[in-house]
């Protein structure tokens, strides 16, 4: 038996334990920066395995390290732990017991899987070189936990590579390993337009803040089509508007909230500049004023080309072990690994990692069904072993 076969065997042998961990996390989901039980469970499992760890300065985050004792590369593997404010509608034995909280994005699988990968790499550390850091990260969904952990020193020692896996509601074995930009930059703008209140019978004495907001919205909706390169994917959504106190009073204040998404830094800053200019000049032209608040969201995930090519080559070279018992031919494996331009306008805070070190995020199908973030999202626990084999074998190939 070679080392890759041994890794696959350990993954199969530990499958029931990892399934139990996943289902416990799923039963007791926790929102961003509240992952107390999940974090404690991770620490218990790391203690059981015998992997050293430190608590991150960012609450509930954990950073564990496996040192082979031999000089080599530093590989960082990341899993996010938080759930979403969604009421689960799936009839399973391990259904969420927390009202309006659900693992509807697969982070329970990510966490359980990284524990399994850590155990495998720890058992096999005599056969690879360098170090592995296991990052159990809070608040991917709402709060940018990755950014906060990096600001707190996570990458003081810059890794040679970072790898993360995100489950996808696609056929088991489907892998999206796109190169270059994979997800978008995302930012929020909150704009307050100010006018002058007056009775509707005397409009000349007022400045209509709602009217200013409507005029601004009309111009804002032209930014993507008129100010940005159509090949440089972007989107702007004005999702909330509020204002006024009564139907017979000219509104003195109105607010709008919008989300912008951009593939590149250039389009991101062009859009931000246009939003600011349109809102200010529209308000001024119509006799009012405005206050603009920009909240920087997530950085785009950028998959390093060389690292991604290495991963794809490694997966294809050992596909017999990764796709074991799935009856995939070599041609079918080729068809199930999507490479090249796989850009999508969704966002993921693994982007903060990819801006600091060569990184790769893999979207991995673990079963077809409802989309992520839906109350009926479901992944069968038995499929977790696929991502465990995938991440463990790729990490071993990188470090051996």
Image (spheres, helix red, strand yellow):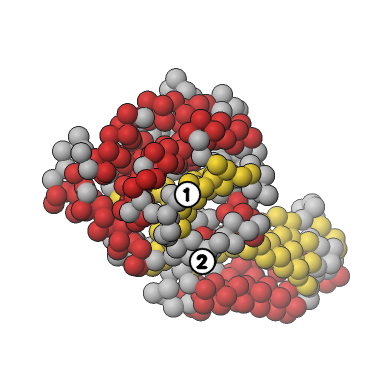
Image spot of residue 266 (x, y percent): 51, 77
What secondary structure is found at the residue carrying circle 2?
Answer: loop
Classify 335 as above or below 389.
below
Between 160 and 168, the one lying in front of the other is 160
Task: Sort mark 1 into few (<14), some (14-19) or many (20+) by Cα contacts within 10 Å.
Answer: many
Asked if residue 372 can be seen in this view, the reply is yes
Q: Mark 1 points at which residue?
A: 67
Q: In this view, does 367 lie to the left or right of 184?
A: left
Q: Is residue 120 left or right of residue 83?
A: left
Task: Sort mark 2 into few (<14), some (14-19) or many (20+) by Cα contacts within 10 Å.
Answer: some
Q: Is residue 140 left or right of residue 3?
A: right
Image spot of residue 143 (x, y percent): 63, 51
Q: In which quarter of the image is residue 40?
A: top right
Q: Nearer the viewer, mark 1 or mark 2?
A: 1
Q: How many labels does the image show?
A: 2
Q: Residue at x 22, y 43 (%)?
A: 2
Residue reaching furthest to the top = 93
Which mark sits nearer the N-terminus, 1 or 2?
1
Q: Which residue is drawn at 30% across and 61% down?
A: 310
């Amino acid at each position: 038996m070679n080392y890759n076969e041994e890794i696959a065997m350990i993954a199969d042998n530990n499958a029931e334990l990892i399934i139990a961990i996943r289902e416990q996390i799923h039963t007791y989901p926790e929102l961003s920066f509240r992952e107390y039980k999940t974090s404690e469970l991770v620490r218990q499992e790391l203690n059981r395995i015998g992997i050293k760890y430190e608590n991150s300065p960012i609450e509930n985050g954990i950073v564990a390290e496996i040192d082979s004792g031999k000089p080599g590369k530093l590989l960082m593997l990341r899993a996010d732990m938080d759930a979403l404010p969604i009421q689960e509608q799936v009839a399973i034995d391990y259904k969420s017991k927390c009202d309006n909280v659900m693992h509807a994005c697969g982070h329970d699988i990510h966490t359980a899987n990284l524990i399994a990968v850590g155990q495998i790499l720890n058992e096999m550390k005599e056969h690879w070189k360098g170090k592995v850091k296991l990052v159990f990260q809070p608040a991917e969904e709402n709060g940018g936990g990755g950014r906060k952990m990096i600001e707190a020193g996570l990458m003081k020692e810059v890794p040679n590579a970072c790898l993360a896996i995100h489950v996808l509601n696609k056929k088991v074995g489907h892998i999206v390993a796109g190169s270059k930009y994979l997800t978008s930059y995302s930012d929020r703008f909150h704009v307050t337009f100010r006018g002058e209140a007056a009775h509707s019978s005397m409009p000349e004495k007022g400045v209509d803040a709602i009217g200013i907001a409507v005029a601004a919205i009309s111009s804002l909706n032209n930014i993507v089509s008129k100010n940005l390169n159509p090949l440089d994917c972007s989107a702007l959504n004005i999702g909330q508007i509020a204002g006024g106190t009564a139907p017979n009073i000219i509104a003195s204040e109105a607010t709008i909230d919008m989300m912008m998404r951009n593939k590149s830094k250039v389009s991101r800053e062009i859009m931000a500049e246009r939003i600011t200019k349109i809102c200010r000049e529209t308000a001024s032209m119509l006799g009012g004023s405005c206050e603009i608040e920009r909240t920087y969201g997530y950085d785009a995930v950028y998959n390093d080309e060389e690292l991604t090519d290495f991963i794809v080559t490694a997966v294809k070279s050992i596909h017999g072990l990764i796709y074991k018992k799935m009856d995939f031919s070599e041609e079918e494996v080729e068809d199930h690994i999507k490479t090249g331009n796989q850009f999508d306008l969704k966002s993921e805070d693994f982007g903060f990692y990819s801006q600091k070190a060569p990184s790769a995020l893999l979207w991995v199908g673990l079963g077809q069904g409802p989309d992520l973030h839906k109350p009926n999202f479901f992944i069968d626990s038995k499929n977790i072993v696929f991502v465990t084999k995938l991440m463990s074998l790729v990490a071993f190939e990188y470090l051996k």
